Image (spheres, helix red, strand yellow):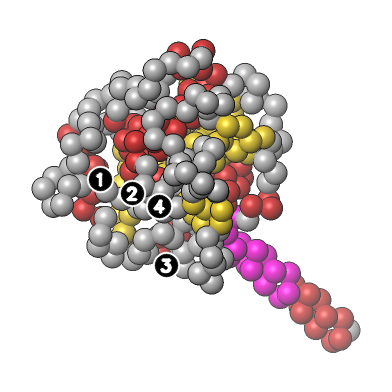
Amino acid sequence: MRTKSLTALLGAVLSISTILAVRAQPPAPTQTAASLTMPLWPTGKMPGKGPKEGAVEHAMASRGDNVTRLTDITEPSLTVFKAPGTTKPTPAVIISPGGAYGLLCFDKEGTEIAAWLNSIGITGIVLKYRVPNNMQGAFQDIQRAIRLVRQNAGDWKIDPNRVGVIGFSAGGHLSARLSTNYDQSTYAPIDAADNQLLRPDFTILMYPAYLSQGGAGLSKEMRVNAKTPPTFIAHTEDDKSFISGSKLYHAALDAAQVPNEFLYLATGGHGFALRSKSEINIWPQKCKDWLIKQKIL
């Protein structure tokens, strides 16, 4: 009897340990399969600055932190990760990884985020935008991306009125720029997709970079007004390089009476995504709660 009780107790402890270990891990790219990958631009039709001559997209040398960093993006694309287990149209979020406009943290701030979005019933769409050193090309890419998502909403079982953006660091800047400049197309129409609206229905900014202009206020390209999409921001005070921009952006949203939530905590640093062990690791649940409040979920 004692042996059986000890065995049962040990089994329960191991089961609980396993559950806790699984919960401690960030969503991995293997948790979901890409439905499709499509180029943003028809052959020969990409506007603006292209890649440097002889450039070939590649993963950069490992830094020992289990992050895949891509650079020299020659063919911008969308990779669609459909929310599983649903036949109804779902919300969709275009994911812009960070990397200082020099590279893309493609798994940590891309495919892993798509897996998390899938887990809460949202189709995640990872944007591979032009890098390095091509901010205007990247902006053209995200404008084209939201138009393609809306054009393909029927085929991808997406609700075209619940299409949002999430961006990390430089990707946060890119998402904020789209959200405040949706009335300014940056390229001539190419096909029917370019008749679609540019304004996201909601915006999620994760430790966004470059929102302020050297301590002199909000960047002029951040044209916040009453029509700016509802916005969720997550940032920490110890991200000294970029926290001031989030504070200014949040204040501008408040002044324009745009629904928004600012998850502002003391610690977490920069680039945490889903891998943080500090207090900012509550952001996925807080973001989900906000999406429910906004009736996106």
- The residue tagged with tag 4: helix, strand or loop? loop
The residue at 36%/47% (across/down) is 133
- Report the predominant secondary structure element of the magenta stretch: helix
Q: Quadrant of residue 36?
A: top right
- The residue tagged with tag 1: helix, strand or loop? loop
Q: Which numbered disc flags the more N-terminal residue, 3 or 1?
A: 1
Q: Nearer the viewer, mark 3 or mark 2?
A: 2
Q: Position of residue 88 (x, y in %)?
A: 65, 25
Q: Position of residue 10 (x, y in %)?
A: 76, 79
147 horizontally vs 134: left or right: right
Residue 251 can be seen in this image: no
For disc 2, the neighbor class at 10 Å (few under 14, some 14 to 19, many from 20) is: many
24 horizontally vs 196: left or right: right
Residue extending furthest toward the left: 216
* Residue picked out by circle 2: 208
Labelled pair 2, 1 in contact (Cβ < 8 Å): yes
Residue type, mark 4 in image: Gly
- The residue tagged with tag 3: helix, strand or loop? loop
Residue type, mark 1 in image: Leu
Labelled pair 4, 3 in contact (Cβ < 8 Å): no
Q: How many marks?
A: 4
Q: Is residue 150 above or below residue 202?
A: above
* Residue picked out by circle 4: 102
Q: Which residues are magenta?
A: 13-27
* Residue picked out by circle 3: 278
- The residue lying toward the viewer, choosing from 66 and 49, is 49
**Label placed on residue 211:** 1
- The residues bearing labels 1 and 4 have C-alpha atoms spaced at a distance of 17 Å
- The residues bearing labels 3 and 2 have C-alpha atoms spaced at a distance of 18 Å
